[in-house]
Image (spheres, helix red, strand yellow):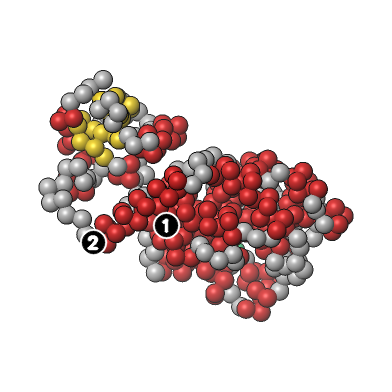
Amino acid sequence: MNVKPDNFFHIEMDLFQDRRIFPFQLYIFNPSTMEYTLFLHGNQPLIKDKWQLLNFVIERGGGIAVRKDQQKTFLSSLKLKEDDVPSLSHTKHISPEIEALLKEQKLAKEKLKNTVQGKSKFLLNEELPKSILQDNFSNLIIAARNEIAAFPCSFSPTVSLARYLALNLLEEDNFYNRVVALSYHLAIGMGIVDHASLGSLICASFLYHLGNTQVDFGVLKKPSAELFDDDRKKFRQHPGLTQHLLKKINLDIDVRCYQIMLDHHERTDGSGFPNFKRHGQIDPLALVLGAVSHIFEYHYGLVTGKKTPLQAIFINLQNKTSIQGLETEFGGHIHQSLVHLLKMELLKSNAPDQAKVA
Ligand SMILES: [Fe+2]
């Protein structure tokens, strides 16, 4: 224990960016005792559990600190200047735009705290089956928006963009907002909770079909399960076209986000495209986006040309039933999560005849 605040400076987690090993020590500050406790030794990895614990500490009003005698090491290893760290900044100047963003984020955090504690779990277990049965995803979309609004403003360009898109677009119940919200909630249900991963997934789920703007509309109008030869070849170019367009405009999003978009049609049995990847070659977040996108495409009739009730799709996914155009090879983790989280018994009991027959 150390109780001398003059020996420390406080930092925000977003300063770590993508780094998880540091040559300096991290301390936790306990505001109720005003004490600093060593949390992580230098050159030890900040593993997922510890990262989550730090988030928990901050949510409870605690702080993260570094010893002042390690200030130089801290700044040089993270390629920061003193002015990048509010507690070290000499100018203490924050632009009005950043100040407004910080205020907005703080309000979003408070709003979130004032609603239901542990809301993500609650939503997945309680709200998702209701959304499916009622074919209404408004609650999930707004819940995702509220949670993403509380993401840090300056963690990374990808997280900032995710936050911006969510705040400005996640309102009405439509195809793309469903894809974003369900991908987000499903990832959290699978234990993927860090801002970096979720930021990549959110941006990818907003942007992944940008390449469709370059595909012949006549091809896009046809059910995807009925595409052959040239049409199928053209359709299968859309993930690469999305990547091409975004790189052309130099959109500042991370590599993982690009990969998720490119791989959203890859399937674990190698039946996907564009690179026929298998199992461990595919990022789990690409499988999440791929599964969610496929579910809603199937529902809206984009796969077979015929609209299908959502509960019928989920039941067939659970059973891995072979029906026309329905893809089920999204990996065991996603399959188990869907089965576990969506209360299949509830869906079954309310399933229309069509689902029972399929
Ligand atoms: Fe697609």
Q: Position of residue 128 (x, y in %)?
A: 64, 50
Q: Identify the residue at image location x=59%, y=50%.
A: 288
Q: Position of residue 66 (x, y in %)?
A: 24, 33
- Say whether residue 282 is visible: no
Amino acid under disc 1:
Arg
Q: Identify the residue at image location x=68%, y=50%.
A: 129
Amino acid under disc 2:
Pro
- Say whether residue 296 is visible: yes
Task: Tell me the quarter of the image containing the C terminus.
Answer: bottom right
Direction from residue 335 to residue 113 in the image, left or right: left
Q: For mark 2, what is the residue?
A: 96
Q: For mark 1, what is the residue?
A: 163
Crowd band around label 1 with a 10 angstrom C-alpha radius: few (<14), some (14–19), many (20+): many
Q: Position of residue 94 (x, y in %)?
A: 20, 55
Pick whichever, 255 or 140, lies toward us.
140
Q: Which residue is outermost to the left?
A: 90
Pick whichever, 68 or 349, lies toward us.
349
SS at badge 2 = helix
